[in-house]
Amino acid sequence: RLWNNNTFWLQHILGTPLYNYYLRLCGARISPNTHIYTTSIDAPGLLEIDDGSWIANETYLNCLYFNDDNTFKLSPIRVGSNCSIGTRSILFDGVDMQNNIIVQPMSSVTGFVASETIVDSEEHKSRPSDISIVQSNRSLSICHQIYQIIVIISIICIHCILLTLVYKVDSVRQIPLPISIAFCWTLWSIIGCFISLLLLKFVVGPCTAGEIYPIASWLYLQKIWLRQLIVSSFHHAWLLPTGYDYLYPYVLRWLGAHIEENVKLAQIDTFLSCPTNLLKIETGVTAFGGVLIVPTELTLSGDHRVDQIMVGSHTNLANGCSIMPGSCLASETMIGNLTRISRETKSKSGVFTNMSAVCSK
């Protein structure tokens, strides 16, 4: 419960050495050059991650496993060096991953995984012999780390100034406490939304389709890491609008997205977390809760590629589905719950469920 309460604050240091130090204090054996973007860790003391590995957001590291006889079993999770684990993957029931392994998003991993393996869903595939994987350097320089610390401090200062401003405005006139609390929350949310949009548009800026960012690069920190930090830090401000708010399409259009009429979005966070100028959503699209627009896809060298995402007219994105960069969905398509869509998914009108989308490659 304490870990869950700290999740909001921990999101400010994800992907930084500060988070690695925090996990070490919790008992984990984490290499200094590891990049971890998830807080879904149930037993940090049983976690071991070697140098240069990257773990995406919403990845579950489950050392606590529930047996059929109503007992729990604690099993360690070990991740070797230069491994890349995609978003919404699950590592459970004892994991021993060797080196240079790529785990595609929404995959499950358990047991031993040999080096230079590509894990896709529950399938383990060896790296093709005719493809040479050259891992890029994933070590952040001192300048990169200083930049991250300065940005985090700046975000905290923005929140402090914002809270001070709200307090000053509220103290001008004495009003009953319940009304004062509601007024302060509303004012903070409105100003927070505007600040986050200004930062996303003028500080983070647009991305170019097909561009590749090494993890230890300034472009990755600016275009990917900083975007995630801004969206997560101002997450509560965006709780003021209700689900499927009519303002969401206008906000995304202002950030450069191509959004047509009658588009309904349950949540805006996931769309703000990806390069919005690469989004093209046609008329009549509905995105339900829990939809994840994955901002980048992994290359064989462990770098991150951004690309355009196109959603055809009158398409429904069901709860918990994940849309990868390069996806192109035809009109009148229904994406089922917990389904992963990527550039390899054959796009045609119809229904994609969890297995059909992954297997139709």
Image (cartoon, helix red, strand yellow):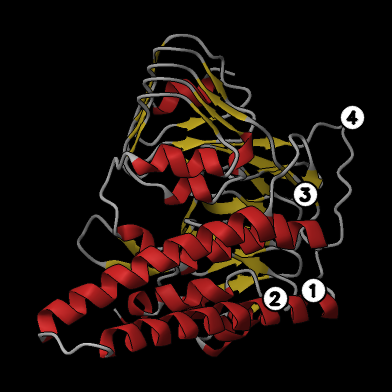
Packing grade of label 3 (10 A; few <14, some 14-19, many >=20) is many
Disc 4 or 3, which lies upstream in sequence? 4
Between the residue at mark 1 and the residue at mark 3, the CA separation in whole angstroms equals 17 Å
Disc 2 or 3, which lies upstream in sequence? 2
Disc 1 to disc 3: CB gap under 8 Å: no
Q: Amino acid at mark 1?
A: His
Q: Which residue is mark 1?
A: 144
Q: Which residue is mark 4?
A: 130
Helix, strand or loop at label 4? It is loop
Q: Amino acid at mark 2?
A: Gln
Disc 1 to disc 2: CB gap under 8 Å: yes
Q: Residue at x 65, y 44 (%)?
A: 296
Helix, strand or loop at label 3? It is loop
Packing grade of label 2 (10 A; few <14, some 14-19, many >=20) is many
Number of dots carrying numbers:
4
Disc 4 or 1, which lies upstream in sequence? 4
Foreground disc of the pair 4, 1:
1
**What is the quadrant of the N terminus in the image?**
bottom left
Between the residue at mark 4 and the residue at mark 1, the CA separation in whole angstroms equals 35 Å
Q: Amino acid at mark 3?
A: Asp
Helix, strand or loop at label 1? It is helix
Foreground disc of the pair 2, 3:
2
Q: Which mark is residue 303?
A: 3
Q: Amino acid at mark 4?
A: Asp
Disc 1 or 3, which lies upstream in sequence? 1
Q: Position of residue 255 (x, y in %)?
A: 57, 44
Q: Residue at x 58, y 70 (%)?
A: 14
Q: Residue at x 57, y 46 (%)?
A: 274
Q: Which residue is mark 2?
A: 148
Helix, strand or loop at label 2? It is helix
